[in-house]
Image (cartoon, rainbow, N blue to C red):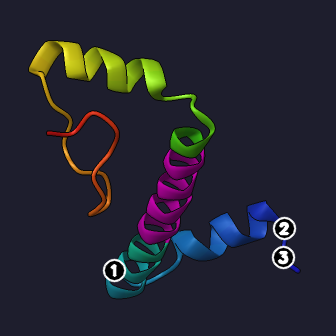
Amino acid sequence: MKTVTEIQEAIEKLPAEDLAQVRRFLDELGAEEWDAKIEADSKSGLLDSVFDEADVDTGLLEQWDGKATRGAK
């Protein structure tokens, strides 16, 4: 396995099209990790206060990933 420094140096030498492909890959990876974290936080109740505040502010909650969240009208 290459070191982070070796990977960074290799990335710096990539042609623009390959660099764009690496960026897309990392963006997608980050988005998947973010979605999983938010979903886990939601299921564990860590976001209940955020949902409550949104419900107070708007009177309803948006759908979360295609599923109605608690308090949605």
Q: Identity of the amino acid at label 2?
A: Thr
Q: Residues within 10 Å of mark 2 (few under 14, many from 20)?
A: few
- State if disc 2 and disc 3 touch (CB < 8 Å): yes
Q: Which residues are magenta?
A: 26-40
Which sits in the foreground, 58 or 34? 58
Horizontal placement of 73 versus 18: left or right? Answer: left
- State if disc 2 and disc 1 touch (CB < 8 Å): no
Which sits in the foreground, 6 or 65? 65
Horizontal placement of 45 versus 61: left or right? Answer: right
- Tell me the residue at 33%/80% (across/down): 16
Q: Identity of the amino acid at label 3?
A: Lys
| Distance (Cα) linking label 1 and label 2 | 22 Å
Q: Residues within 10 Å of mark 1 (few under 14, many from 20)?
A: few
Q: Quadrant of the C terminus?
A: top left
Residue at far right of view: 1
Q: Residue 16 shows which numbered tag?
A: 1
Q: Which residue is mark 3?
A: 2
Horizontal placement of 55 versus 24: left or right? Answer: left
Residue 9 at x, y = what percent? Answer: 65, 68
Question: Is residue 39 shown in magenta?
Answer: yes
- Tell me the residue at 57%/28% (across/down): 46
| Distance (Cα) linking label 1 and label 3 | 22 Å
Q: Residue 3 shows which numbered tag?
A: 2
**Mark before the other along the chain sequence, 1 or 3:** 3
- Tell me the residue at 15%/30% (across/down): 60
Q: Quadrant of the N terminus?
A: bottom right
